[in-house]
Image (spheres, helix red, strand yellow):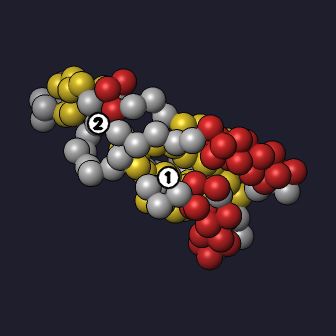
Amino acid sequence: MRFIILFFQKETDWIERSLVRKVVAWKHAQSEKGVFITGSPLKPDGFTTTLVPNGDGSHEKIEGPLNELEKSLFSFELVNAESMEAAVAIALSHPGAEDPAFSIEVREVWDTVDLDLGS
């Protein structure tokens, strides 16, 4: 199964270069195990555009994230795991879990979508 690990932190918080090095090493180690699929930090909220439906088939373009939260979505990792418990263990092994500035969300990703649902 695939899981996405989302890291949230205050936009004003910066991460140390040493943490970045640990994350790169973690990604290499998890890749060798066949766990890590992809992942990357995201640019700050100021680089975000949200499209909100107007109800008439058109969308309003809003500069910034959809939800104004205390913490911003900072980065993601897409991983393979046998279960939610295994995915949580993988998330907790991530160097970002050592930083109290981060909140972490783990969510299962649909492996397939049945294209015949409408038939």
The part of the image, by quadrant, that contains residue 88 is bottom right
Q: Amino acid at mark 1?
A: Leu
Q: In this rendering, would 95 be left or right of 35?
A: left
Which mark is first along the chain, 2 or 1?
1
Residue 5 percent location from the top left of the image: 55, 55
x 87%, y 51%: residue: 32
Q: Which residue is mark 2?
A: 65
Q: For the residue labelled by badge 2, is the local secondary structure a helix, a strand or a loop?
A: loop
- Counting every numbered tag in the picture gives 2
Residue at image position (50%, 52%) is 6
Residue occupying the point 13% across, 32% down: 54
Q: Residue 8 in the image: x percent, y percent?
A: 42, 51
Name the image quarter holding the N terminus. Answer: bottom right
Dividing the picture into quarters, in which one does residue 73 lie? top left
**Farthest residue, direction right:** 32
- The local secondary structure at tag 1 comes to strand
Q: What residue is rendered at 12% in x and 35% in y? A: 55
Q: How packed is label 2: few (under 14 Cα within 10 Å), some, or many (20 or more)?
A: some
Residue assigned mark 1: 6
- How far is disc 1 from disc 2 in space, using C-alphas? 15 Å
**113 to 60, vertically: above or below:** below
Asked if residue 55 shows in the view, the reply is yes
Q: Is residue 1 visible?
A: no
